[in-house]
Amino acid sequence: MSNSSLETSAQRPGSNGDRPSVVRWTTGVAAAMNLGLGLGLGQPWLAVGGILGLGFVGLRGRSLAAPHAAAKAPAEGPPPRRPRPMVRPPSADPNDLDTLVEEMLAQGRYALLLRPQIAASLSEEQFQRALAALEEDMALVPDGDVFLGPIDDAAEDGRLDETALAEGPGRIVQVQRFFLDRYPVTNAQYAAFVAAGGYEQPALWDPSILPAVLDFVDQTGRPGPRYWRNGTFPPGREDHPVVGVNWYEASAYARWVGKRLPTDAEWVKAASWPVRLSATTRLQRRYPWGDTMDRTKANLWGSGPGDTVPVHHFAGGVSVGGVYQLTGNVWEWMWGNYLPPDGSESTWAAEIGLKSLRGGAFDTYFDNQATCQFQSGDAAVARKPNIGFRLAIGACDVALAWPGADPGVSSAEPCSPEVQP
Amino acid sequence: MTREAIVPLQSYRLARYAAPVPCYICEEENTFDAEFCTHCAAPMALAHQLLAQKLHPKLIAVLGASAVGKTVYLGMLIDMLSRQPTRMQLLARGAFSITLQQTTMAALAHCAFPQKTPNEPDRWNWVHCQVARPGEKTAVDLIVPDMAGDALLQEVDHPHTYPVISSYLRKCVGALVLVDALRLKEGHRDQDYFTMKLMSCLAELEEDPKTGWARRPVAVIFTKSDQCEECQADPAGYAQAHAAGLWQQCQKRFPVHRFFAAGVAGACALRTTRQDGRVFIPLRIEPYGIVEPFEWLYDQLKALGWLNRKRALAKP
């Protein structure tokens, strides 16, 4: 990030002229490097230093970007599922670990605190609170394999014959156990990221997209999702899924909270909940609730208001594992690329740059395009009114027992490279 | 004994042959067992149905260049109104009226656009349907064919190439004119020129100030606008900026007009195949702005009194 781009950022319409300072950017980059090195080399104190640095940058960003704090959104409609992001005055001392932990818990960044290297520096009480937040917000999906691809022809009484599946264009993918958000990320949750200056922290963004981040603005030219105004979401939509965010914005938010976008295999596994019946047959649901479309269980074309609904609506469509709205309401960004169906003598010109989408949205017309298996795609920079996201984290990436009890055991075995996104 | 029984039956058939059946579109005479009009190739099923039921349906045209999306728009519109009658109710009359809906939906559900409509009129899909707003006691019968864009262009450039087109357009009470927003956005002027030709031809078919196109509603629909946000936001402004000729034609010669934006695919990818070359593939189906133009046209037809007329417009 050059100084010239910093100046451009500071002079962006709708932004304060005195932010972001070079000091903040430098601190952010250094903190990110610390965090990366700490995690990579297994040096917990280096990683903690990185976290503190990022926290400092975040607090500074929030204090400077105070006018577009999301906490000003009116509290109309049903109460939000989770407490709103806590709004505290910036910590006077960025080295105050307790304050920083409280801040991160209030912002829903518990996954970051549960990283094995960081969890070791938490008190048991802090760790238990972070773990409780994880268990409340995310569903554990067990490990196992899942079939990706069309199952229409192979299905017989709900059973899939793997011999027949092997002849088709699909594939079987092994997935390690992981946690998946029970609900799509809401406007209120995303507002905490915007208020904390997430759009001004280069460490959170893919380096290739950094120059374009300046263009990720709302209707009034302020950093944020496309359909927001003045840096905040439309009134009464705090618990609607955040939309108008592209794949890079979703990824940046994921880094900020210490999670990641799910892979296609993870998402399909959580939604279709496959069960192996024998060595060659398996059950894999067509929809999260079963094999038959029931439009009362999902916000699709003709079954909802023609717009997004709060993330806790259509509760009847919950998956076996307790994940809501996997079908309907908004398409969800996946980590991977859109893979066009094989089997035809053709080349797909636009496949590069198309990211995978799954789940269907409030305007999805056909039932077969709202199944667990159906994959769509869109440009990674697309900011559309029917695309949102939810996040995942590998079970092996978080400490599920307080490492303070036995410092030698900080986590389970490391994630297998095959399932890394 | 057997022979005596057959003779009167054959006489009856001969008598039916002797009584001609006029085509509903061109009003030329045909034999009772003709499948298509021998003069214009319109399906005679329409004429038989209307004679039997003593109906006088109104004709609406769906016009536009080749590959602009006429088949997709019409198929999607019929399917949406059939599935969810909260805004308008549409019921198909006759099995032949469901073919367009069936083939279009089958293709879109499998992430493909339907095959190009062939130029031969006897291979076009015609829709005869009943339409009513919620609360309306009597439904209105409408006929809408899915005409090929290339055939329309040929008829405009070389009149009488396709008699069915000019005959049909003379009797139409309103039109849905489709324009490819994406091609306009890319700077191609062919859409503008073609639509100007079409509108000019339409206006000259009926110039009577009381019954001509000056009194008939025209909905101009920018298709594929899901890939053109500017068009979605302000279709009229988009027309003025990108299709100035069309915009002028509408202002001067079609006082009852409105611009709309519509789209069917949420996103598209470009695929190159040996057989078809470069084709757009819809990655998902999310209809947008499909019903609004038809609703507006229906309301205008009603307000202007076209739906109350007992007979279709006379052949000149």
Image (cartoon, rainbow, N blue to C red):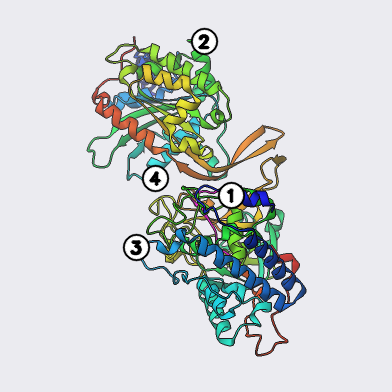
In the rendered view of the protein, which quadrant contains the N terminus of chain A? bottom right
Q: Which mark is residue A214?
A: 1
Q: Residue furthest left?
A: B137
Q: Picture coordinates of residue A399 (x, y %)?
A: 64, 79
Front residue of A216 and A183: A216
First in residue order: circle 2 vs circle 4: 4
Closer to us: mark 3 or mark 4?
A: 3
What's the CA distance linking mark 3 and mark 1?
31 Å
What's the CA distance linking mark 4 and mark 1?
43 Å
Badge 1 crowding class, 10 Å Cα cut-off, few under 14, some 14 to 19, many 20 or more, is: some
Is disc 3 placed on a helix, strand or loop? loop
What's the CA distance linking mark 3 and mark 4?
33 Å
Do badges 2 and 1 share one subunit?
A: no
Do badges 2 and 4 share one subunit?
A: yes
What's the CA distance linking mark 2 and mark 3?
63 Å
User: Which residue is drawn at the image coordinates 29% and 24% (left, top)?
Assistant: B56
Q: Which residue is mark 4?
A: B83
Residue B141 is one of the magenta-drawn residues: no
Q: Which residue is mark 3?
A: A76
Badge 3 crowding class, 10 Å Cα cut-off, few under 14, some 14 to 19, many 20 or more, is: few
Closer to us: mark 2 or mark 3?
A: 3
Q: Which residues are magenta?
A: A380-392
Badge 2 crowding class, 10 Å Cα cut-off, few under 14, some 14 to 19, many 20 or more, is: few
Do badges 2 and 3 share one subunit?
A: no
